[in-house]
Image (tube, grey):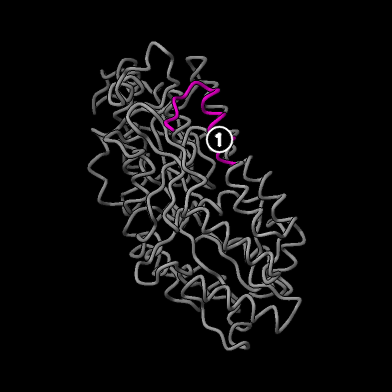
Amino acid sequence: MFKKIAPVLATLTAAALFTSACSSSDDKADDSATSNEKVALTYWSWAPNMDKVVEGWNSTHPNIQVTVNKQDGGDPAVTKLLTAIKAGSGAPDVMQAEYQKIPTLVSADALADIAKEAGSLKDKFPAAAWNSVTLGSDAVYGVPQDSGPLMFFYRSDVFDKNGLAAPKTWDDYAAAAEKIHKANPKQYIGTFSASDAGLFTGLAQQAGASWWGVNGDSWTVNINEPATQKVAAYWGGLVEKGVVDNKPMYTPEWNAALNDGSQVGWVSAVWAPGVLEGSAKDTKGKWKAATMPQWDAASPATGNWGGSATSVTTQSKHPKQAAEFVAWLNSDPAALKLLAGTANVYPAANDTTTILTTPPAFFADQADFYTIAADAAKATKPFTYGPNVNVAYSAFNDAFGKAAESKKAAAFTESLATVQKATVDDMKNSGFTVAG
């Protein structure tokens, strides 16, 4: 279903297309390897110290040895894999793949379906994480490795001074933003960063949006829809009022604002402590983590910002052994400890709280840090990515960048139509069938 649909294939069912997309690994696989034969696998990953994590596997599986090849993350990794797939050689057996890139890789017939080998792991992961590797189907295109559930981080000293508690709802957040900025015009509770489409996607996800979907043998695109419009209008309103900043994140100016107390809150993900430790080292001990402000406090929900899976490629000659390794890496308790402690990632598996018992150093005084994170992961709403996330994100950066500069709330919601059109047009031009 995720291949480019040529006219001759237009009448095929979604199930048939799924089968065609996943059959190549079985056709190419060398199934002659037995448990007594030695198999060598290659694994492309950008996570730090992954070679040390894999040593845990190699030491206990002498007949299936895995070699880690460190790669750049993001688009460069995808481009390199797609080049190898197109060439018919050079791809690894196992690939670390960001959730939003999985549809692109599946559409290019780059990832194998490992449902037979890994499908039983479903209950070990939050529903949203598992949805990210299945694309809403019975196929399994990887095992979730790490996730980035959204949380709220705030300067407790500033909030206490203003008589504020961590905001439980987005109305609370807006009220806190106004009070903090009124008390000190140099301080903001946060910023709307138009250069971080991934964060905005997570915010839309929390509100109930899912920008892509599958309808029979066609894709659907719903970026300019009510839940996302609500999120855009909300942040546009705060920017227009001037109670949140409109500057991009991850700049020297932004780092300075975190460190000097100009920005006293941050809607971010579970990995935020590492960023704060590098950007706001002078404020250590003054921050606290909390659950995300909610649209409906009675039905807690959040979204993701980041996260990846470990997938078996269609060029692997040993897909069964590769799938066995992938399952171990992301569900075995010993492996999860290594992922968290050595690779410094937040494992996607459900039982993270039994592994992460000590809070991050930057939040050393908050013993319940990982309990909050685990609750957030379980409350993450499902979200389906499409085959051209890069195009949608680029359109977001352009349209919302102009909206943020204008400081007009209406421009935020109007930008969604621009992103929607750019995404749909690109998919159609690429040969995908788009319903509606």
Residue neighbourhood size for the residue with mark 1, other residues' Cα within 10 Å, grouped as few (<14), some (14–19), many (≥20)? many
Query: Is 85 above or below relative to 214?
Result: above
Residue type, numbered disc 1:
Thr
Q: Is residue 300 positioned above or below 159 on the image? A: above
Q: In the image, is residue 175 above or below residue 269?
A: below
Residue at the disc numbered 1: 423
Q: Is residue 33 left or right of residue 109?
A: left
Residue placed at 58% from the left, 89% from the top?
163
Regarding mark 1 in the picture, which secondary structure is present there? helix
Q: Is residue 434 magenta?
A: yes
Residue 104, percent from left and from top: 48, 31
Total number of numbered discs in the rendering: 1
Q: In the drawing, does residue 298 fall left or right of residue 385? A: left
Judge whether residue 433 is colored magenta.
yes
Residue 415 x, y percent position in the rendering: 62, 47
Q: Which residues are magenta?
A: 419-436
Where is residue 129? Give x, y as percent.
Answer: 37, 49
